[in-house]
Image (cartoon, grey):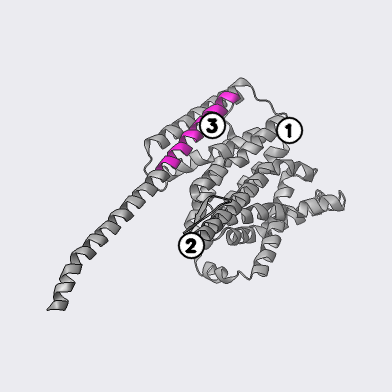
Amino acid sequence: MGRDRGSGTVTGSGGGTAEAGGAGDESRAGLAYGVAAYAIWGLVPLYWPLLKPASAGEILAHRMVWSFAFVGLALLTLRRWGWMKELLANPRKLGLLTIAATVITVNWGLYIWSVNNGHVVEASLGYFINPLVTIALGVLVLKERLRPAQWAAVGIGFAAVLVLAIGYGRPPWISLVLAFSFAVYGLVKKQVNIGGLESLAAETAVLFLPALGYLVFLGSRSELAFGTEGAGHMALLASTGIVTAIPLICFGAAAIRLPLSALGLLQYLAPTFQFLLGVVYFHEAMPPERWAGFSLVWLALTLLTWDALRTARRSRAAVAHAAKEAAERLAEEAAAAAPEAVREQRA
């Protein structure tokens, strides 16, 4: 065993340092991919206004059509088509993906409309409260049992919605629809259990013909913005497929390199960026009651994150303790069996 004088790292003959370095590189790459994915999702409110005067409905239709084209090309390049035969032979999965496609259509469409109509802050709230809604759905649909800290977080989140409803003079319906639609989407995707790129391909395949038909309908009524605002605008509308797929690919790369606890923390980057854009860049109003409501949401998320990290740490400790006990039992059994084996050999 030696010591690297420059770094103070202990090295062994088995190449432990190289393995540790490789793991560290993978973690850093995963972190970079994760930050890239959530940063793109967080900064996308800067992109949707560039697509005006196209309506939210037209932008949504373009997003579906061009996403299908881009993802289809990516899968063709990667030669990842084996999943299609299994999917087509499973009516239940096809039905669930159709539901997922319908729900994400509502989510995408409302989000685009919100950004282009001055509701970026309220949209960001939807993604802040999404983890709380997901937990609530787990209780109601999957009959999951919550820990006390999770119950407290959900209760604080409910109080935040009430405070914001008073502040807005109405329920924050944009936030609630975005949160519930994305939570339902995640619940359905969990039942389907296929890769992110493959899932997006299947969902946009379901949506492709209706979206294309809607674009044709708009064109027949001379209400289609595509082609009327110059080549640059056409390119921006066509880029909706890239803007949709690239962060998903980055997220997939991060998911195989980072623990779930790290991904859970990174997910708050997107709504944080959205919130900051809404307040600082788009200059949306933030009266005291909204600050109070958002503060309650952030308190609930802090409690939720603390509980998740604590539970993960305890689980790792329990696994390590169980492994240690198992190793000690095996050692004791081996030690007890050794004299017997010696006696048998002498006999």
Asked if labels 2 and 1 touch by Cβ distance under 8 angstroms, the answer is no
Whether 285 is among the magenta residues is no
Q: Residue beneath label 1, please? A: 281
Q: Quadrant of the C terminus?
A: bottom left
Dot 1 surroundings within 10 Å: few (below 14), some, or many (20 or more)?
few
- Element type at marker 3? helix
Asked if labels 2 and 3 touch by Cβ distance under 8 angstroms, the answer is no
Q: As shown in the figure, which amino acid type bears the numbered disc 1?
A: Tyr
State the extent of the magenta-drawn residues as a range.
Answer: 290-311
Mark in the foreground, 3 or 2: 3
**Residue drawn at point x = 19 percent, y = 67 percent:** 337
Question: Is residue 312 shown left or right of residue 43?
Answer: left
Q: Residue beneath label 3, please? A: 298
Earlier residue among tags 3 and 2 = 2
Whole-angstrom CA distance, mark 1 to mark 3, is: 21 Å
Q: As shown in the figure, which amino acid type bears the numbered disc 3?
A: Trp
Whole-angstrom CA distance, mark 1 to mark 2, is: 45 Å
Res 274 → quadrant:
top right
Q: As shown in the figure, which amino acid type bears the numbered disc 2?
A: Arg
Residue 152 position within the rendered picture, expressed as x and y whole percent measured from the top left: 42, 32
Dot 3 surroundings within 10 Å: few (below 14), some, or many (20 or more)?
some
Q: Residue beneath label 2, please? A: 92
Earlier residue among tags 1 and 3 = 1
Question: Foreground residue, 89 or 148?
Answer: 148
Dot 2 surroundings within 10 Å: few (below 14), some, or many (20 or more)?
few
Instruction: Considering the whole magenta stretch, tell me its main secondary structure.
Output: helix
